[in-house]
Every structure is written in C-alpha cells, then in structure tokens.
Amino acid sequence: MYKAEPFHFTNTKKTEGTKFPLFFFCVICVICVVLMVDSEDVASAPSTPATPGTPGAPLFGGFKADRSRNTRKSLLQSCRCFSVEAWAMEEGSLGGVSCSIPPPLVSLARKVGAEFIGTFILIFAGTATGIVNQKTQGSETLLGLAASTGLAVMIVILSTGHISGAHLNPAVTIAFAALRHFPWKHVPMFIAAQVMASLCAAFALKGIFHPIMGAGVTIPSGGYGQAFALELIISFNLMFVVTAVATDTRAVGELAGIAVGATVMLNILIAGETTGASMNPVRTLGPAIAANNYKAIWVYLTAPILGALCGAGAYSAVKLPEDSDTQDKPAAARSLRR
C-alpha cells in the first residue's frame, strides 16, 4: 500500500537525543489549546437533521428516550421534537411517545481533545501498518493494510463520534464548513488538532521503528496526474458517504462507523498500490515531515480537499427532500435508525 524508500538518519549519534522534541512540543501545544478553549460550550450533536446553521455535523444524532403512558409533563414540555397540548398530558391520554431529547453540552475543548486523540489513533494505525508491512517483507498484504485502516476509522467514529463528530481529516472539516454543517470559527481549532495529532503519531513511530520510517509515507508510484485523479475520486467517495450518514437522518446513522470504515477500506483496495490511498492531508503530512520525504506532497494536500468538497456537494444535490407527511411526524419517528 505505501511505497517509499526506507528512511535512514544521516547522523545516528546526533539524532538519538533529539528523536522526540517535536513530539513533546506538539503534545504541550495541544494541552495549551485545550486549556484556552475550555470555556466555550456547544451542543454535542443535533437531534434533528443537520441543516444550514446547524452548529455541527457529528456522525451520531441526539439521545433518544421512549416513554409510555406514565410520561411526565416536564419531559413532554421540554421535548423539542413536537408540541403536546395540555389536555394530552393527562395520565392515560398518551399511548406511546418517542422523543428526541436534546443532547448535553460539550465544551469545544473536549471536542478538540477528542479530535486530537481520534486522529492520533488513525494516523498511528495506518502508518504503523505500512511500516510493519515493509519490515516483515510484505506479510500484511494490501488487504491487511486496508482492513487495519478501515477498522481504525470505525473504532474511532464509534468511540468519539458523539463527542467531536470524528472528522479526523481537514478535508472533512472544510467540506462540512463549506456546506454550513459546521461553524467556520471552529475549523482552525479542529485542523490544528488534526495536524498536531499527525505529527505526534509520526514522530512516535519514528522513535519506535527507527530507522525505518519511509514505508509510512504515501507517495505515488506512477505519474502525478494519475495520483491526483485517484486521490480526488477516492476522497469524493469517502465524503459522499460521510455526508450521507452525518447529515441525513434517513441514512444508517447508527452504523456510521461501519459505513465509513468500509468506504476507507474499499478506497485503499482501489488506490493503495498507486497512491497509498491517503484521502487525508494529515495522513501524509505528519509522516512526510518525520521521514523528510516530501515527494508529490502537493497532491495529497489539495486533491483530498477538492474531492471532499465535491463529494459533500454531490450528496447535498441528490439528497431526497422530506415529504410533507414525514415533516408532520415527530422527529423521532423520522429518525428511528439514528
């Protein structure tokens, strides 16, 4: 999947004492950022479909609670998904109520922290698999590399999707912001967390697998034009699926991790041997800096962003409008799979 010449240090003695300075610097920066933004609170996930003005685009909807005839008046009055007349609140008047309860507030600091941890796990897993594959003379195989990265994406989405939305990718963050599913004012913080997580993961791997690091860098095995086209297309595929499960309540929202992970795995099987199947600027940036290998890096910094913008726009264009009957029903009834 990841084709690159092994990276070797030119001066081993000199670098032994300086393997981790940048790693620790990035960790300190993240801690400072978290402390600075800890005071701002935003909703963790919308309980209704993401629309222009929605404060975020996480991969999971709000918490849901089903109540029977013993539903309390206070719960019904606080429910935002539909209005209930006073006479209907009397005991025994309601057969069954399904209501989406607004999720608790999550501070921006927690979101940024979750994004940092999730991106670190993804970059560490994807890059480490490529390095181990080279170190063991290809024992992992392309299928193993694809499965490793796909599983990492699935695990991170399932574990942090309800906190930060699990973007894990500057291209995803920018695409959501461009479609007004994510606030632009939070974009710099998310991208900073993603970049620092990539650097920390790359330099951690550099220290662990020294001096082998080149196999973790995504570089094209063919022409730059071919690599650009492939990265754009697979990024389009990824963002099309992400937009579907993150912004449309009729999609399989609760299976978002599986859907996105499977898409990543498919894309790696398609383009892994040709481009390394980055789909993510920080997947390439951190390992490239750690290995000092910047071949065709412009391809991996531009094509995924363009592809993500096109993918998000394409789904928004073909997304089916909700009919009037669906709009008249409670929100929970329209989003039973979320």
Image (tube, helix red, strand yellow):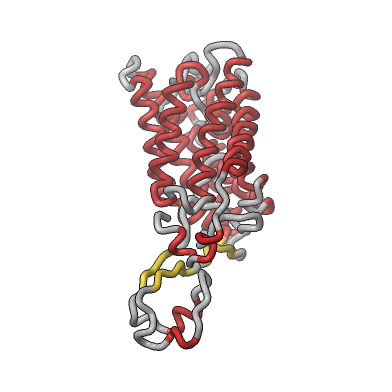
Relative to residue 279, is residue 225 depicted above or below?
above
Judged left or right of residue 159, residue 29 is: right
Residue at 55%, 56% in the rendered image: 323
Which image quadrant is residue 169 in?
top right
**Nearest the eye: 290 or 299:** 299
Identify the residue at image location x=54%, y=44%.
243
Which residue is at 56% across, 37% downward?
A: 22
Q: Position of residue 11 (x, y in %)?
A: 53, 19
Q: Which quadrant does the N terminus fall into?
A: top left
| Residue 294 position (above or below residue 151) | above
Residue 238 coordinates in the image, percent (x, y):
51, 35
Q: Residue furthest top?
A: 222
- Taking depth in this image into account, of 99 and 256 the one nearest to the observer is 99
- Looking at the rendered structure, the number of numbered marks drawn on it comes to 0
- Above or below residue 301? Residue 68 is below
In the rendering, at what x and y percent does residue 36 appear? 62, 59
Front one among 262 and 192:
262
User: Is residue 163 visible from the viewing direction of this image?
Assistant: yes
Residue 25 appears anywhere in the view = no
In front of the other: 242 or 300:
242
Residue 113, position as x, y percentages in the image: 52, 52
Quadrant containing the C terminus in the rendered view: bottom left
Residue at image location 36% in from the left, 30% down from the top: 147
